[in-house]
Every structure is written in structure tokens, then in C-alpha cells.
Image (cartoon, grey):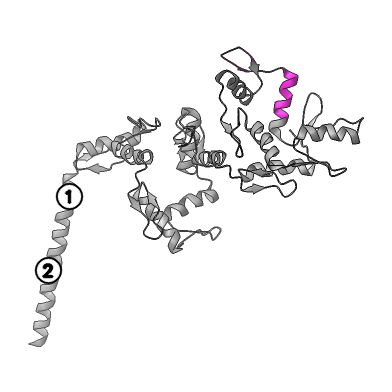
Amino acid sequence: MFISDRMEVKRIKQELNEEEEEHRNFKTQRIESKKRHTCSQCGKSFRLKSGLSNHMWHHSGEKLFKCDQCGKKYSSLSNLKVHLKLHSDEKPYVCSVCGKGFARLNSRNQHQKTHGGVRDHVCRECGRSFTTAAQLKQHQRIHTGEKPYKCSYCDKSFSQPGNLKSHERVHTGEKPHRCAQCGKSFKQSALLNYHMHVHSGEKPFRCDQCGKEFYSSSNLKKHLIIHTDQRPYVCSYCGKSFPLLVNCNRHQKIHTGEKGHVCSECGKSFTTSGQLKYHQRIHSGEKPYECAYCERRFPQYSQQKSHERIHTGEKPYSCTQCGDRFRHSSSLVLHMKKHFPSSPIHSSS
């Protein structure tokens, strides 16, 4: 009697499980039956026709929704709305640890993992660990060489979507990162951060040789070549050598006579866009660089720094022969001629 009762219970349980499975299958079929709109490109289905229509923009590459602030385009209205929060300074998603705000929920969630220190996504190739699976996936493309993100304007491909976006701005001219101080716009957020040092005056990278300070580590590295006497870039016309390639290229235009940058006001031409920009301030009267110690303003940054040395007493250019120091590199060049009257002296510019 006991055995038959136990078998009866087992049979009832099996029937209930079968009914539950049948109910789940019915529910799934009902949901799937509602997704009558199927993408002919990838087979993905949608309940609403509008959902399919929005999805199809991903395949066509067409972006109809344009941001009025920076001109960036999107394939869906929802993506545009998310983007607009960046311009409005609206950051509704706040980190529960440090209080930092974010425009997007996924950005906040990724940020919060940095506090926990949880890096459970490990690369099998090099052992480097990451907080998210997406970060690991992007990193692994370094090892595989995979570049799935193709530029829609040229044949270049990239391993990360962020790199693709930065590159495509070369074609579109888009500059979404705008300085709140002066209104100048930039293609990359890193360039905006670099530019902001101009307003703050902060120069965190200092040369140990002469005390000169720089906004970025890359500029400091370029400057350090001057102290090593390395001049690897040689002019193909006269043999003069330079520590930086940009200096050599600028110099060679003296030989070629190339002056492709023409002032629209007076017709005067220049070898570089920077020279033209500085010249045009003569016409506009613009003096964007203000002395940090008095109210004098200057059209060129180099003029501002040269003037500020009157206040600070800074003399960054040192003579290697006698130790005398000078405010300007041109003064050092003139001084060196006293030591070497018959030798050509190169300036550091």
C-alpha cells in the first residue's frame, strides 16, 4: 500500500511538471507569435512594425536623427535623446559610492565597479584583468588583430568603436567637445582637457633640466630632445638638422617657397596655418592670452609667456659653456656667438 501511494505521488508530480512545461511552451509561442515583423537581413523579430523600422537603420547605415548642438547623427530617436543629455549637463545617474553623476546608466554602472575593485574578466593571452566582459572583449582584439569597425568614408578599420568615431570626425569635421570658457570646440575629449589647461594655467609636466613646464607629457617628451642634442631630422636642401620633425618640415618650406595659407583680408600668404591664424589677429584685434600677473593681453601665447618672465624672473635657457641664463632662446643664441664666433649656432626652435 505504501509503495503504490508513493508511485501515485510520483505520477502526479510528473503530470504537473508536464503541464508546467506545456504552459511555458505555450507562453513562449504566444510571445513569439506576436513578433510578426522579421528583419530580412538578420532574422531578428519585433512585435511592432516601428521596432523593425528602427532596427533596419542599423543595417542601412542611414542616420536621420541629427543633434542641433553638434551635428552628430543617429539611427534612432532614442539614441539621439540619450546623446542630448551630454549637452544639457543632465546627469541623473549618480554613483552611490562617490556621488559622481553620469548621463547614461551603463556608464554609471561601469564606473561603480572601479570602487569595488572587482576585475573578474581575465585575458588568457596576457593575464590582464577587467571589470566588464565588454572591456575584456575590446582588449582581446589587440591579440587577435580583429578590426570590426569600418569607416563609412574610407577603407580604414578599427578595433574599438570609440577609435572609429574619433577617426570619422576627420571626414565630417564634427567637434562635439566644446569649451565652456571660450566656446572653442574639439574632436576629442582629450584635446578639450588639454585645452582647458590654457585657461587654468596649470602645467603639471616639468622639465628637470631647465624647469620649463608643459600641459602634456607628450610635449615634455618632445622638449627633452632639445637637451640631449639629438637632431635626427635633417633638411634635404641644406643639411640643417632639427630635434623635431615638425620643425624640419616648417624649415624646408623656406627652400620650396610653399605658402599655401592665404589671409582673406590682405592676401598675405604663410607657410603654416598657425602663422596665418596669428597674423589674422592683427586684423581682428583679438588678444586671447592674458598675463597671469597683470592685465596685459597678447595675440600669441609665446608673447604672453615671454612677458610673464618679467614678473617671475624665470630664465629657462642656460648656456652650457658658462652657465649664464636667459629669458628667451634668441638671447641665448646671440650669447653663444661670443663663445663660438665662427660657428653657426642653431636655435632650439
Residue beneath the point at 33% across and 41% down? 82
Residue 40 in sight here: no
The circle drawn on residue 16 is: 2
Report whether 291 appears left or right of 69: right
Q: Is residue 330 a member of the stretch shown in magenta?
A: no
Residue beneath the point at 41% across and 54% down? 110
Residue depth check, mark 2 versus mark 1: number of the one nearer the observer:
1
Quarter of the image with the N terminus in it:
bottom left
Nearer the observer, 128 or 280: 280
Q: Compared to 182, does 16 lie above or below?
A: below
Residue beneath the point at 9% across and 83% down? 4
* SS at circle 2: helix
* SS at circle 1: helix
Residue beneath the point at 34% across and 44% down? 90
Instruction: Tell whether label 1 touches label 2 (CB within 8 Å).
Output: no
First reached walking from the N terminus: tag 2 or tag 1: 2
Nearer the observer, 16 or 227: 227
Q: Which residue occupies the extreme right position in the image?
A: 342
Q: Compared to 329, does 144 lie above or below?
A: below
Q: Which residue occupies the extreme bottom position in the image?
A: 1
Q: Compared to 259, does 78 lie above or below?
A: below
Q: Which residue occupies the extreme left position in the image?
A: 1
Question: Residue 154, image x and y in percent?
Answer: 49, 29
Residue 32 in sight here: yes
Report whether 49 appears left or right of 94: left
Q: Tell me the magenta residue range.
A: 248-268
Q: Which residue occupies the extreme top position in the image?
A: 267
Q: Which residue is mark 1?
A: 31
Q: Is residue 259 a member of the stretch shown in magenta?
A: yes
Find residue 65 and report its image quarter. top left
Quarter of the image with the C terminus in it:
top right
Q: Compared to 283, does 227 lie above or below?
A: below
